[in-house]
Image (spheres, rainbow, N blue to C red):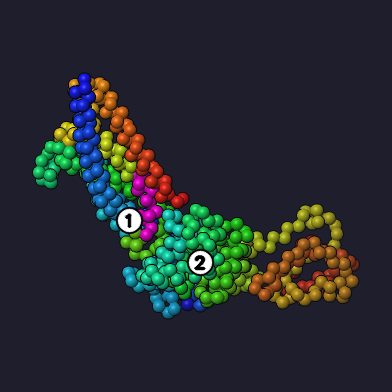
Amino acid sequence: MIELKGIHVEFRSNGNIISAVKDASLKIERGEVFGIVGASGAGKSTLLRTINLLERPTGGSVTIEGVDITSFTGGALRDLRLQTGMIFQQFNLIHTGTVYANVAFPLKVAGKGGQEIARRVPELLALVGLEEKADAYPAQLSGGQKQRVGIARALANSPRILLCDEPTSALDLETTASILDLLREINQRLGITMVIITHEMAVVKAICDRVAVMHSGEIIEAGTVYEIFAGPRHEYTRQLVSRTFSLELPPRLLGGNGGRIVKIHYRGGRAEEPVISETVRQFGVQVNILHGQIEYIGDNPLGTLVAELVGEQGQVENATSFICRSTNAVEVIR
Amino acid sequence: MNDSIHELLQDLVKAFGETFQMVGISLTLSILVGIPLGLFLFVTERGLFLQNRLLNAFSGLLVNIIRSVPFVILLVLVLPLTQKLVGSTIGPGAASVPLSIAAIAFYARLVQSALCEVSRGVIEAAMATGASPLQIIRHVLLPESLPGLFRGLTVTAVSLIGYSAMAGIVGGGGVGDLAIRFGYYRYETRIMLVTVVLLIVLVQVVQSIGDRLANRMDRK
């Protein structure tokens, strides 16, 4: 659907050339929700903007449904943008226009007639749950409502692609969840391909099918969300993921002279297997669970458990290797 | 006594008429020419959708030249042009030529700075919908900057009332000219004070109408 090949974007600033994006390549499939995650300044916004040519790449090519759009100008560029919606962190609504006027704007741009606009706008407002607010001005809306207007505006011309630039970063947690739900629903109902930029792994986990990780202008890793969470390869990705799974034990527990402490990582179906109860039954050791967390990404569980094994030296040893064999991922902490 | 009051009243009515004529003509022209010029200065800036550094620098320079010439000098400098356009160099019509030139340049800069207040994000969002430059100007830039455009127009009107006093030099007349003629040349302090008070009232009225309109349009 969308293919970025060897994208470079360079800026000139005070005579220096700054590379915002370096040799980035991606393939985004039709109908998927694709995340691009990274710190601010990693170049993810710039990369996103090459898809509708708000940013023209200085190297590489952008292909959408087999058509190379990199050098589009004039009417072709306009048509491309009509078929590509975009929403923004700061919503970017026209303050002096009502909700209705904001949603009607892209329809006017597309040359739609008054009747069609009058039919389409209420439809779009219903889709985002803002039927009542047609005559309100943006200043009278909450952040979440503003983003809903942004979404309605972006969907006005029934685009194939929706580009989302940090769509929830200006929103509180609860509103974030409702906006993400709405985006997911739109993705499933309308089959729109979505590209979402975010610095929050929670957003990736909540809505994305696949994700690319960007770090100082480069794509360092890409894969399904589960792959990235379960087996981050790059150091930067590991940091990102570990922030989601922060299992810090209080020093008191680590300092005492109790039994052996192990950290067990569950991947995939194994999270549901009764490894712990097996261990207790087979080796006669006591298992104290000190800390644990299981996340579900899609349908797949992903978890970490910190447990203390108490018992005879030999039995603890056997138990450890049993857990190790069953789960493939055990760290002995003490 | 009665006669002199009657005479003063007549003078004042005539002077106000002349002031309104000069300010009206120049203000109309600054809307008609100053807004497009300010828009042009803005959209040709770096990073905007009609970026053109050469044209931007050229028009900016032109505006700056006009703005840096003291108004009294401008008045004299454009006399040949005034003669050609109005067919005379005397009277409120003639004075409107230099006043308009100064007001257009002045207002163009105010228009430009009002447009700078429009968030780049909103412009970008409009570009992302595929809007053409003209559509962005019509549906985004102008409505979003309307309060600022009105505030700028108020400032321009007030400045014009001040500038029009100097138009007396070319026989333009007006309230300011009346104050100078009676108060300064003839030492008739009373008449000068009356005209000054009337000018203050005029400026106050213009300013408060402008503020009220701008605030009503502001939706932020």
- Identity, as a three-letter code, of the amino acid under mark 1: Val
The chain ID associated with circle 2 is A
CB under 8 Å between discs 1 and 2:
no
**Residue B70 image point, x, y percent:** 23, 36
Q: Residue at x 12, y 37 (%)?
A: B90
Question: Which element is circle 1 on?
Answer: helix
Q: CA distance from mark 1 to mark 2?
A: 32 Å
Question: Which element is circle 2 on?
Answer: helix
Classify residue A27 as left or right of residue A243: left
Estimate how packed mark 1 is, as few (under 14), some (14 to 19) or many (20 or more) residues with alpha carbons within 10 Å: many
Estimate how packed mark 2 is, as few (under 14), some (14 to 19) or many (20 or more) residues with alpha carbons within 10 Å: many
Above or below for B166 versus A16: above
Is residue B149 part of the magenta span, yes or no?
A: yes
Which residue occupies the foreground of this view, A97 or A211? A97
**Residue B131 image point, x, y percent:** 37, 65
Which span is picked out in magenta? B139-152
Mark 1 vs mark 2, foreground winner is 2
Q: Residue at x 63, y 72 (%)?
A: A226
Residue located beneath label 1 in the image:
B43
